Image (cartoon, rainbow, N blue to C red):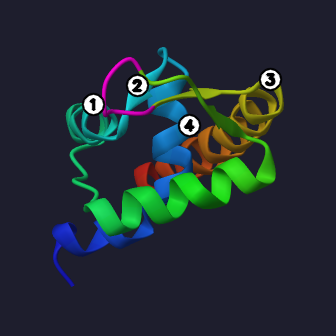
């Protein structure tokens, strides 16, 4: 397995909410931001499927559209869920890196 195969471990929901933590964005802007932030390029099907699930969970909301692009924003519930997830991932990364240093 090459390092590119690790992209499959990148959760689109976390990437989307991390992007929206920086401010409201429409789909294409999220795809660009996520790629710049993580090196992961989400396809439209993956992006909009995850957006739909996040909206149903109350983690993000769609905003009024000024043109044909619909912007989305993270909700307080979503920000709390993202904070918890990133804290957990941070702990996992810290321990994993420490263990790698011992090998």
Q: Which residue is mark 2?
A: 25
Where does residue 58 sit, x and y in percent of width and height?
79, 43
Q: Is residue 9 above or below residue 16?
A: below
Check residue 62 in the rendering and tell me which mark sits there, or answer none. none
Q: Earlier in the sequence, mark 2 or mark 4?
A: 4
Look at the image and tell me whether residue 52 can be seen.
yes
Using the rendered view, name the quadrant where residue 31 is placed: top left
Q: Which residue is mark 1?
A: 29
Whether residues under marks 2 and 1 lie with C-beta atoms below 8 angstroms apart, the answer is yes
Q: Is residue 44 left or right of residue 20?
A: left
Q: Earlier in the sequence, mark 3 or mark 2?
A: 2
Q: Which residue is mark 4?
A: 17
User: Between marks 2 and 1, how big is the CA–CA gap?
Assistant: 6 Å
Q: Give the residue at x 46% y 44%.
A: 15
Quarter of the picture holding the C terminus: bottom left
Between marks 2 and 4 in the image, the one whose residue lies nearer the viewer: 2
Where does residue 14 sit, x and y in percent of width and height?
55, 47
Magenta span of residues: 66-70
User: Between marks 4 and 3, how big is the CA–CA gap?
Assistant: 11 Å
Q: Is residue 21 left or right of residue 29?
A: right
User: Between marks 3 and 2, how big is the CA–CA gap?
Assistant: 16 Å
Q: Give the residue at x 61% y 48%.
A: 95
Look at the image and tell me whether residue 103 can be seen.
no
Q: Give the class, few, some or many, for how many residues have Cα within 10 Å of label 3's Cα (few <14, many ≥20).
A: few
């Amino acid at each position: 397995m090459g390092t590119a195969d690790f992209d499959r471990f990148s959760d689109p929901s976390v990437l989307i909410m991390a992007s929206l933590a920086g401010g409201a964005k429409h789909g294409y802007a999220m795809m660009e931001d996520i790629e710049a932030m993580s090196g992961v390029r989400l396809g439209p099907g993956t992006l909009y499927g995850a957006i739909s699930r996040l909206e149903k969970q109350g983690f993000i909301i769609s905003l009024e559209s000024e043109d044909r692009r619909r912007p989305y924003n993270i909700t307080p519930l979503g920000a709390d869920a993202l904070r918890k997830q990133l804290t957990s991932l941070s702990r996992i990364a810290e321990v994993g890196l420490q263990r790698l240093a011992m090998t």
